[in-house]
Image (spheres, rainbow, N blue to C red):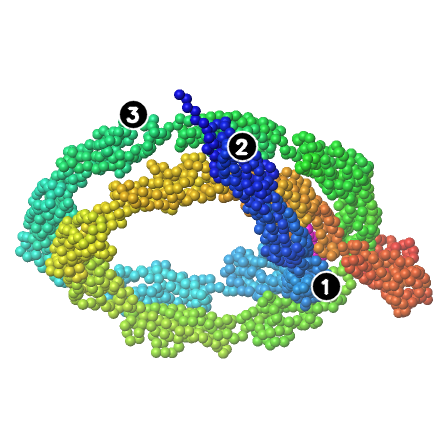
């Protein structure tokens, strides 16, 4: 039967989802299908009921449509208009009736970036003053963007990079660098770019104009600071010093100068400073003043500079002696030796002020060694007063000037007579003897001495060395003057001194030996022991023990008088005498003695006749000692069970035969915690507890110790055996055992082992068996060893829980049995059984040059396993050299090396995906990567560098050379175009094929070289540019003639010029190439050098060649030719005029016979004339006199400058200056002749005569002497001495004692000043006069009237030790026992009447036994040395001795008794310490039985006990009964807070102070379940990297429950959903999903700890911070950057590069590197690379091009923040030599400045003519002082910085010389009507111009004026034809050039014809002098005189003729009309001087 069910339409169409949300971009095109939803119908398939016939969508107005397939299409969308749509899609089936179904479709429109920002700037123009500091500017920059989110976020930046402004991304505009209106840009137009955050971004721009406002912000700057110049002293005022110059960087600034010192200097508007006074070097060497430069700004700014003017010295001071001209020298002076050191002063400096001395008097006795180098006068032969009493020597002092100056003195040396003979004794040693009882005045012996000197020098006085017994008289008798004591000494050795009358006297000593004879006159004296002393001796002292030493002495000196013998008297035979010691004679037994106290009589006798003796009695006490130890019973053994409730006791006994404390003993035991013993009875109490598990047997040592000193003891043992019981449960080693095993673990495998131990001591009690609970647990079993093994196979996938937990029970075999449990937790882990599956990527390609670390693609894979089995790693296995790597965790393939398509364009990568399972499973895939091309090759120049040479005379279009350039790219990237640039590039052309041609004529002298730049680039849309430099050198040809700077040179020299003296330098220059033959010049004299008196070196230095002494002619006109060394050579000539100057050199002289010694009294009044001297000058000059005295004595004398008379100028003092050497100088007044003034000098000795005007002066203000009491006079005490500055009798001092009550006790030697004690006088220190006496001593000189002085003499009386210390006979003291060492006991005080050391007392402690006391030897303080125990000993007796420090010492003794006081010194003794009590937590109010047992052996209050708890906090929990010690619990306890309390119980007795003991009671608190789990280690904050693989460990949490056992068990669980999971076995959190920092930078995870027993839980938050991965490449905002530098000296940044990296932390920390890619003198290019700091760093690069003005050296440096790199330049561009002075005048100081353009610090080195002139220095200026012609030349400077050097063009220095008329106009006489020829010659540079003027009585004519047409005027000559008398007068010649002028004049005499006569003379010229131009003895001056006598009127020779030369001595000129020369000569024309 088939039943067919027919369908009806009862199922509506159904959609898979009822709500769908679709996201689509607003940029989606209209009619785009954005969603497809297919409906299904469950009616019969393929029937109309199930067929969907239509889809509809509503609302229709929204514009969305749906087609019959259910595909929904969108209309045009605009996010800004509408962001979402809610639609309903309906599907209808074909049934009847039809049914429909719907779902809700939400369309979300996403925004795209389709709106650019709109910028608003307010204001659009802003003025910023140039001095504004970097800050925020007042301009508002905003922008709006209609887009949303990042697309609407707008950031700003400036398009201009090289501006002093910074725009923040938020639109804040800052001034970041200083502005400068004067040198910088005065306005800026800033383009502001606003960019939104869309992708791709949109932007817009707007402009802001910023004007720079000018302010006066620059101060003037001097070109040098400070200025250093020098001027010579003595110049005429208003002479040039220096020119200062300042500049101001402000626009249109003008500077004015002012001086701080206008009294010495003046300054003009150009900065020229002149001195308006003349300086004297000796008064001032350096003048400092300041110059102020002020600009014209508002307000004005100024700056000061210091000018230092150094005054240079000339030799204008004569050296002057400082020594006196009379000295005294002893006749005994050794030879050779220096007897006088000369001293002189010359006020000049340097060599001018250096002096040396010469001896001008021949002498065999004296000399000045090495004259010129020493200032010492040496005596070379012995002096003898008797032969010569004085010497007179002439000494001259010279300076080293040229010419030198000197002065002379006459030195008188007086020989001083000396005392040269000493007294001589008639024998050297004297001997004598005397009995010690001899009387005073007894003559022992006589000595005699004789002195060969005469007079007072030969008188002999005797003195004897200090002694106690003897004196000497002036007859030489040695006398006894005091009682003799021979007990201490046997002889006396004395020295007798004989002195003559010399001052100081000469003395001789003689040795005197005197023997002293002794007699027996002293009794022996016993010093120790003292009479009645008691000595203790122990009974066990061995035979020979010393009881005491007998100390005795006898004051007699010699045997037998001082030989002592010792005897004792004592009962029995115990003691004997041995030497001076009493000793034990036989063994002593204290118990056998009748009495322990012995009386001993001691007798000490000497050996004299009769014998003398001393006797004392002492006592000896025998002491008992402890010599029997106790004998103890035992040992004893006892057995007890470890849990025994009560313990038995045991008792020990002992015996000791000793008596007193030696027979008393106490018991002690080694462990007082477990057992205790009664120290008196020996009863042992067991305290417990005893634990068999701790110790099975105890051994205690029991000791019985007696109380003797030292104590003796005996020991035995107590043995306790502890019996075991079963009182310990088995204990597992762990509360929980955990293990993980894989699911495939084999059956019967041991999983883990549990271990339990039982601490009971016997086998039954400690044997353990194991079992598992619950019993139905079937997976695991356990054996008796605790091994747990697998019983059933495991399957990870089918287990209900991967953690299996059960209990293990451990039970012992005791009776009853005890057990414990532990938890075992086993986790089953998965095994690896699935391989990773790889999803293939599509086709891959990448552009070459892509930045490193760029992600190419991501390989995706899956693995079905879990945990590490499902985690996998990626790797590239081939090729290994491919420039790619793969991230092992996320599969990102990244670029690891540079991609270069030209090297390889396809890579085939094999990628391995391997999981982390064990064993690991893997899969592989092959990926092809295609490399796309980019334009990445620059044009490359071949065969660089390009250095070409071409001659300067080539034609246009001449080929220079070619360059070659290639590009590795192809197509447009390899097509290259090139251009030529650089200074002078218009001189050349560059063809397309790289050929360089000349474009115009070249001239090396204009430009010698060209540095050009060739720039080449490819033709791509982003071309790459390369540059190279081309250096073209124009080579020289010889096409320039040498040029002289002047057409004529003029010099003047002295007629006596030395050979080879430099006259001047002729300079010429050649424009051809420097340092080549074409420009190398040689000089030659080619004409005019008659007699060859001159020569010239090839370098132009004109030298004297005068070898004859005088140059004959008045003028020479030389022709000097300069020729270069080119081929062919070129030359030029110039004229050199040399004028010859006459010299004059006669000085004034004194008649030395008129000079004598001047002697005057020191009382000579001021103004008195004391001497007159006159000098003569042979030339008849007026003489001026001046006077120089010794240094430091100026002004004592003066001289009349006109007459030479010498006067006293101020008061004289013989004592200050006894003699003077006056230097009288006569200075002439030279006429018109050449040369300085001449000076004559004479030395005048002046001796000052003494007057008695000084009183004696003692050499001490007071005197002091010491004398010991009881010493007897006569005795010399002290010598006083006084001096008197006067001489002879005026200075001779005699001494007296002023009358007083004491003066008769002392005497004084009037000559020697020796003060003595009068004979027989003695003093007592304790006497009525006291111990200090004062007398007055007077000293008188022998002048008339005499002068006197006084001084005081203090005499100190010294003490002797004659008093014994005094102290009480006994002292009683007490001290408590147990006090520390050094406790004060008593103070012993003794007194002594003596003083000083004699009265100082030392204390000592004497005792026959060792006692615990000591005494301070200085203070007498008695103190303990140990802790005292009264029970051991209660009193001590000892002796203290007080001894003074005298010699010999004195002493006394006292007896001290010390009683020991008792204290409470026994503390309570706890018998059973550390009692333990258990109590459950949370209980309170219980009384706890702690069973304390305490005893205190003290009695009374000292033995009564009081219990307290020590800790105040514990008293809040517990209380203790103060009488019984029972504890009570006061509060509830918390075991988790404290599970055990250790109470400290203090037990104190009631002594004063009380003595306490402590014991401990342990309270153990048992647990209850009252706590939740607590997490530890919080807070939990951890960081992980984004993108880590699944299963990555994150953090482990730990929690604990302070409850015990099951009360403390809990499980951990992670609450909520997150990409993390918590492993309940390890309590560790791992990742279970993807981690993306950009999505979730932080997770807050809640972990719960849930209790196992009750529903308690606690939770904690785990904070997981996601660490950024380095997945963004840092990128520069521009590529390339182009910066243009206008100021190469700037130190500010020329531009900034900005890079961004979206990563954070080190991934976003950027670093920068740069390399240079191209460079020439105007452009450099660099590649900058930015790299982040990620572990796998990413980087990118950009090009930087820097354009700048011409610069020889430029490099860059950078500073950077994280996102910005600021570029700075370091430059050395050009160097230029500049002259800072206005003129280059001869002898002036000029400064050249090396002006270096650049911003680097550098050193400057100067060169002259190519040779180094200075070392490198930081100073840029070269100062040339005293400029001379030798300084001329080509100067260059180099700026040097390390390896960089740039050089300037040469600067030609030509020295300017002010005009000097070398041949002045002459005085002329001419006939009326004749032609007058006037001549004048001068020198100077530039060549001077001449102007002429004639001044007569009738006319003043400028001869060279245009109106004076009747005269013929040239530079050096004026011709006046047809002269008339109206022209008679003076004419002047003025020579001038730019640096000065000079003027000279002559006189014209016009003779009428009637005045002229002709006279014939017949002379004999037969013997002319060939060396003097034929000049003979015919003098025109004499001839004029003869003619005047003949004619009776004044006659002048007008003309002369003849065969010889007519000479004129008057200075006029003789004119001749014949060809025979007439020459003007000196007055004696034939004396060897040449005619001029």
Closer to us: 405 or 481: 405
**Contact? badges 3 and 2 (CB < 8 Å):** no
Residue at mark 2 to residue at mark 1: CA–CA distance: 114 Å
Q: Earlier in the sequence, mark 2 or mark 1?
A: 2
Is the residue marked by circle 2 packed among few (<14), some (14-19), or many (20+) residues within 10 Å? some
Q: CA distance from mark 1 to mark 3?
A: 119 Å
Return the disc, 1 or 3, that comes first in the chain's sequence.
1
Check the picture and name the quadrant holding the N terminus: top left
Answer with left or right where residue 1867 lies relative to residue 724.
Answer: right
Label 3 or label 2, whichever lies nearer to me, is 2
Q: Is residue 801 left or right of residue 1781?
A: left
Q: Is residue 750 above or below residue 152?
A: above
For label 1, the SS is loop
Q: Which residue is mark 2?
A: 53
Label whose residue precedes the other's in the sequence (3 or 2): 2
| Other-residue count near label 1 (Cα within 10 Å), few / some / many at <14 / 14–19 / ≥20 | few
Q: Residue at x 39, y 64 (%)?
A: 498
Q: Which residues are magenta?
A: 1786-1795
The residue indicated by pointer 1 is 268
């Amino acid at each position: 039967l088939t039943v067919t069910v027919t369908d009806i339409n009862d199922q509506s169409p159904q959609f898979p989802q009822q709500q769908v949300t679709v996201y689509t971009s607003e940029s989606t095109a209209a009619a785009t299908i954005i969603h497809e939803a297919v409906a299904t119908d469950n009616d019969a398939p393929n029937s109309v009921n199930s067929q969907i016939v239509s889809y509809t969508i509503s609302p229709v107005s929204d514009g969305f449509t749906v087609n019959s397939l259910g595909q929904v299409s969108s209309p045009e969308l605009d996010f800004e208009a509408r962001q979402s749509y809610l639609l309903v899609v309906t599907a209808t089936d074909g049934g009847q009736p039809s049914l429909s179904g719907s779902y809700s479709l939400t369309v979300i429109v996403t925004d795209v970036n389709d709106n650019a920002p709109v910028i608003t700037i307010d204001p659009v123009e802003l003025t910023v003053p140039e001095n504004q500091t970097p800050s925020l500017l007042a301009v508002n920059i905003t922008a709006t963007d209609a887009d949303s989110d990042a697309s609407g976020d707008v950031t700003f930046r400036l398009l201009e990079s090289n501006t002093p402004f910074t725009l923040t991304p938020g639109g804040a505009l800052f001034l970041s660098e200083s502005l400068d209106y004067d040198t910088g840009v005065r306005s800026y137009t800033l383009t502001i770019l606003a960019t939104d955050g869309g992708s791709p971004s949109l932007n817009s721009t707007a402009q802001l104009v910023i004007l720079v406002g000018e302010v006066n912000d620059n101060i003037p700057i001097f070109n040098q600071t400070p200025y250093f110049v020098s001027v010579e002293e003595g110049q005429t005022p208003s002479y040039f010093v220096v020119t200062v110059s300042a500049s101001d960087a402000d626009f249109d600034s003008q500077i004015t100068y002012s001086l701080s010192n206008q009294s010495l200097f003046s300054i003009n508007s150009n900065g020229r400073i002149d001195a308006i006074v003349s300086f004297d070097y000796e008064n001032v060497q350096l003048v400092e003043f300041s110059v102020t430069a002020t600009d014209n700004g508002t307000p004005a700014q100024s700056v000061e500079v210091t000018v230092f003017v150094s005054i240079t010295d000339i030799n204008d001071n004569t050296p002057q002696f400082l020594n006196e001209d009379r000295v005294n020298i002893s006749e005994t002076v050794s030879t050779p030796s220096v007897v006088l050191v000369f001293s002189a002063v010359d006020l000049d400096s340097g060599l001018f002020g250096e002096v040396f001395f010469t001896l001008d008097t021949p002498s065999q006795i004296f000399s000045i060694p090495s004259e010129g180098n020493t200032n010492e006068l040496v005596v070379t032969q012995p002096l003898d007063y008797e032969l010569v009493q004085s010497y007179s020597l002439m000494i001259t002092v010279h300076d080293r000037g040229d010419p030198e100056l000197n002065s002379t003195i006459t030195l008188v040396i007086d020989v001083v007579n000396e005392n040269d003979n000493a007294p001589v004794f008639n024998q050297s040693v004297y001997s004598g003897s005397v009995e010690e009882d001899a009387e005073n005045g007894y003559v022992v012996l006589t000595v005699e001495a004789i002195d060969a000197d005469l007079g007072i020098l030969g008188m002999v006085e005797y003195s004897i060395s200090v002694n106690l017994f003897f004196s000497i008289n002036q007859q030489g008798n040695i006398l006894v003057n005091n009682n003799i004591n021979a007990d201490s000494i046997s002889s006396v050795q004395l020295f007798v001194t004989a002195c003559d009358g010399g001052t100081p006297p000469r003395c001789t000593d003689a040795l005197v030996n005197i023997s002293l004879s002794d007699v027996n006159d002293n009794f022996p004296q016993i010093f120790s022991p003292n009479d009645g002393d008691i000595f203790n001796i122990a009974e066990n002292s061995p035979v020979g023990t010393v009881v005491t030493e007998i100390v005795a002495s006898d004051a007699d000196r010699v045997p037998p008088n001082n030989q002592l013998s010792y005897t004792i008297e004592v009962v029995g035979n115990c003691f004997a005498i041995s030497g001076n010691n009493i000793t034990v004679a036989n063994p002593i037994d204290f118990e056998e003695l009748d009495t322990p106290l012995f009386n001993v009589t001691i007798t000490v006798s000497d050996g004299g006749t009769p014998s003398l003796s001393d006797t004392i009695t002492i006592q000896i006490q025998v002491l008992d000692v402890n010599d029997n130890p106790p004998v103890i019973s035992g040992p004893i053994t006892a057995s007890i069970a470890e849990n025994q409730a009560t313990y038995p006791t045991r008792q020990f006994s002992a015996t000791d035969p000793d008596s007193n404390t030696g027979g008393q003993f106490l018991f002690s035991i080694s462990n007082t915690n477990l057992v205790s013993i009664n120290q008196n009875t020996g009863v042992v109490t067991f305290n417990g507890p005893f634990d068999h598990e701790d110790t099975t047997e105890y051994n205690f040592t029991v000791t019985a110790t007696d109380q003797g000193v030292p104590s003796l003891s005996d020991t035995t043992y107590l043995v306790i055996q502890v019996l075991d019981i079963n009182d310990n449960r088995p204990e597992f080693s762990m509360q929980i055992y955990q293990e993980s095993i894989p699911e495939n673990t084999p059956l019967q495998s041991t999983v883990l082992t549990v271990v339990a131990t039982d601490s009971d001591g016997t086998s039954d009690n400690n044997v353990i068996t194991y079992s598992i609970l619950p019993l139905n647990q079937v997976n695991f079993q356990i054996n008796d060893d605790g091994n747990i093994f697998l019983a059933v196979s495991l399957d990870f996938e089918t287990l209900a829980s991967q953690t299996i937990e059960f209990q293990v029970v451990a039970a012992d075999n005791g009776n009853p049995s005890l057990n414990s449990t532990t938890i075992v937790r086993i986790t089953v882990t998965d095994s690896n059984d699935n391989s990773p599956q790889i999803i293939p990527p599509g086709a891959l390609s990448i552009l070459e040059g892509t930045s490193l670390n760029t992600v190419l693609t991501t390989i995706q894979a899956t693995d079905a396993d879990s945990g590490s089995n499902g985690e996998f790693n990626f790797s590239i296995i081939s090729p290994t050299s491919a420039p790619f790597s793969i991230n092992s965790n996320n599969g990102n393939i990244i670029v690891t090396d540079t991609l270069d398509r030209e090297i390889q364009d396809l890579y085939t990568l094999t990628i391995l995906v391997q999981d982390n399972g064990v064993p690991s499973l893997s899969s592989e895939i092959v990926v092809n990567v295609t490399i796309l091309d980019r334009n990445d090759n620059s044009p490359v120049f071949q065969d660089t560098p390009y250095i070409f040479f071409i001659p300067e005379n080539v034609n246009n279009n001449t080929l220079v050379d070619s360059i070659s350039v290639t590009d590795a790219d192809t197509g447009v990237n390899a097509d290259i175009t090139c251009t030529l640039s650089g200074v002078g590039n218009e001189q050349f052309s560059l063809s397309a094929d790289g050929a360089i041609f000349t474009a115009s004529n070249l001239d090396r002298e204009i430009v010698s070289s060209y540095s050009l730049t060739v720039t080449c680039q490819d033709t791509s849309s982003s071309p790459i540019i390369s540059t190279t430099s081309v250096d073209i050198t124009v080579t020289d040809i010889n096409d320039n003639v040498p040029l002289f700077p002047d057409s004529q040179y003029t010099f003047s020299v002295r007629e006596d010029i030395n050979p080879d003296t430099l006259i001047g330098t002729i300079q010429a220059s050649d424009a051809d190439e420097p340092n080549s033959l074409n420009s190398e010049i040689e000089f030659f004299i080619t004409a005019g050098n008659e007699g060859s008196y001159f020569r010239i070196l090839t370098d132009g230095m004109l030298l004297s060649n005068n070898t004859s002494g005088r140059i004959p002619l008045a003028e020479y006109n030389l022709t000097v030719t300069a020729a270069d060394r080119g081929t062919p050579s070129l030359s030029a000539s110039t004229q050199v005029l040399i004028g010859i100057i006459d010299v004059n050199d006669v000085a004034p002289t004194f008649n030395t016979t008129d000079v004598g010694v001047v002697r005057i009294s020191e009382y000579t009044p001021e103004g008195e004339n004391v001497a007159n001297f006159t000098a003569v000058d042979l030339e008849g000059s007026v003489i001026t006199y001046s006077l120089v005295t010794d240094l430091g004595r100026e002004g004592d004398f003066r001289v009349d400058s006109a007459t030479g008379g010498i006067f006293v100028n101020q008061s004289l003092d013989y004592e200050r200056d006894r003699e003077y050497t006056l230097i009288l100088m006569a200075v002439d007044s030279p006429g018109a002749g050449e040369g300085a003034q001449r000076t004559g000098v004479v030395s005048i000795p002046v001796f000052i005569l003494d007057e008695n005007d000084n009183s004696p002066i003692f050499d001490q203000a007071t005197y002091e002497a010491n004398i010991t009491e009881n010493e007897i006079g006569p005795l010399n005490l002290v010598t006083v001495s006084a001096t008197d500055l006067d001489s002879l009798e005026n200075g001779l001092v005699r001494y007296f004692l002023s009358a007083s009550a004491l003066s008769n006790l002392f005497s004084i030697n009037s000559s020697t000043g020796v003060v003595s004690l009068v004979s027989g006088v003695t003093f007592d220190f304790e006497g009525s006069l006291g111990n200090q006496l004062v007398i007055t001593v007077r000293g008188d000189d022998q002048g008339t009237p005499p002068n006197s002085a006084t001084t005081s003499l203090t005499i100190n009386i010294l003490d002797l030790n004659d008093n014994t210390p005094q102290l009480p006979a006994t002292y009683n003291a007490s001290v408590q026992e147990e006090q520390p060492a050094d406790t004060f006991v008593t103070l012993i005080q003794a007194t002594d009447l003596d003083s000083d050391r004699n009265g100082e007392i030392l204390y000592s402690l004497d005792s026959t036994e060792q006692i615990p006391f000591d005494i301070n030897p200085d203070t007498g303080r008695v103190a303990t040395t140990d802790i005292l125990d009264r029970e051991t000993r209660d009193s001590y007796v000892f002796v203290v001795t007080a001894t003074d420090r005298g010699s010999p010492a004195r002493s006394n003794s006292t007896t001290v008794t010390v009683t020991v006081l008792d204290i409470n010194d026994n503390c309570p003794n706890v018998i059973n310490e550390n009692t333990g009590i258990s109590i459950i937590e949370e209980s309170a109010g219980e009384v706890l039985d702690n069973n304390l047992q305490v005893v205190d052996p003290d009695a009374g209050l000292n033995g009564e006990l009081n219990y307290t708890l020590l800790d105040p906090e514990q008293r809040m929990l517990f209380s203790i009964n103060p009488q019984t010690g029972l504890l009570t619990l006061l509060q509830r306890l918390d075991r988790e807070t404290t599970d055990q309390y250790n109470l400290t119980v203090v037990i104190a007795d009631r002594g004063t102070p009380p003595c306490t003991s402590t014991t401990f009671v342990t309270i153990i608190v048992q647990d209850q379940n009252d706590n939740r789990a607590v997490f530890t280690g919080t807070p939990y904050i951890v960081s992980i990297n984004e993108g880590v693989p699944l299963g990555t460990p994150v953090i482990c949490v730990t929690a604990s429950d302070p409850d015990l056992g099951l009360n403390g068990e809990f499980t951990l669980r992670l609450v909520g959903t997150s990409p993390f999971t918590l492993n309940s076995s390890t309590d560790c959190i791992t990742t279970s999903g993807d981690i993306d920092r950009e999505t979730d930078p932080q997770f807050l995870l809640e972990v719960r700890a849930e209790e196992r027993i009750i529903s308690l839980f606690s939770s904690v938050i785990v904070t997981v911070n996601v660490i950024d991965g380095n997945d963004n490449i840092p990128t520069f905002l521009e590529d390339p950057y182009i910066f243009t530098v206008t100021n190469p000296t700037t130190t500010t940044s020329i531009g900034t590069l900005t890079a961004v990296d979206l990563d954070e932390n080190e991934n976003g920390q950027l670093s920068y590197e740069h390399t240079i890619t191209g460079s020439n003198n105007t452009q450099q290019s660099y590649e900058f690379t930015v790299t982040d700091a990620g572990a796998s760093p990413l980087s990118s690069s950009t090009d930087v091009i820097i354009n700048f003005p011409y610069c020889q050296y430029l490099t860059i440096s950078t500073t950077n923040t994280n996102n910005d790199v600021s570029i700075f330049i370091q430059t050395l561009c050009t160097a230029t030599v500049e002259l800072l002075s206005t003129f280059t005048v001869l002898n002036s100081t000029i400064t050249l400045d090396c002006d270096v353009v650049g911003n680097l610090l550098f050193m400057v080195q100067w060169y002259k003519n190519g040779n180094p002139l200075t070392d490198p220095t930081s100073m840029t200026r070269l100062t040339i002082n005293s400029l001379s012609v030798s300084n001329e030349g080509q100067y260059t400077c180099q700026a040097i910085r390390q390896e960089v050097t740039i050089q300037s063009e040469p600067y030609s220095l030509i020295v300017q010389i002010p005009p000097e008329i070398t041949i002045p106009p002459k005085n002329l006489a001419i006939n009326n009507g004749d032609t007058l020829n006037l001549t004048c010659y001068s020198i100077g540079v530039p060549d001077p111009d001449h102007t002429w003027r004639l001044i007569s009585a009738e006319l003043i004519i400028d001869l060279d004026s245009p109106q004076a047409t009747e005269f013929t005027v040239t530079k050096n000559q004026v011709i006046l034809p047809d002269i008339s008398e109206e022209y008679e007068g003076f004419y002047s010649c003025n020579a001038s050039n730019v640096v000065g002028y000079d003027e000279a004049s002559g006189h014209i005499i016009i003779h009428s014809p009637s005045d002229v006569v002709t006279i014939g003379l017949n002379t004999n010229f037969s013997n002319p002098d060939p060396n003097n131009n034929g000049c003979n003895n015919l003098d025109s001056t004499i001839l004029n005189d003869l003619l005047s006598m003949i004619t009776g009127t004044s006659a002048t020779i007008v003309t002369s003729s003849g065969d010889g030369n007519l000479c004129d001595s008057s200075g006029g000129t003789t004119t001749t009309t014949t060809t025979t020369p007439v020459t003007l000569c000196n007055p004696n024309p034939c004396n060897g001087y040449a005619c001029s």
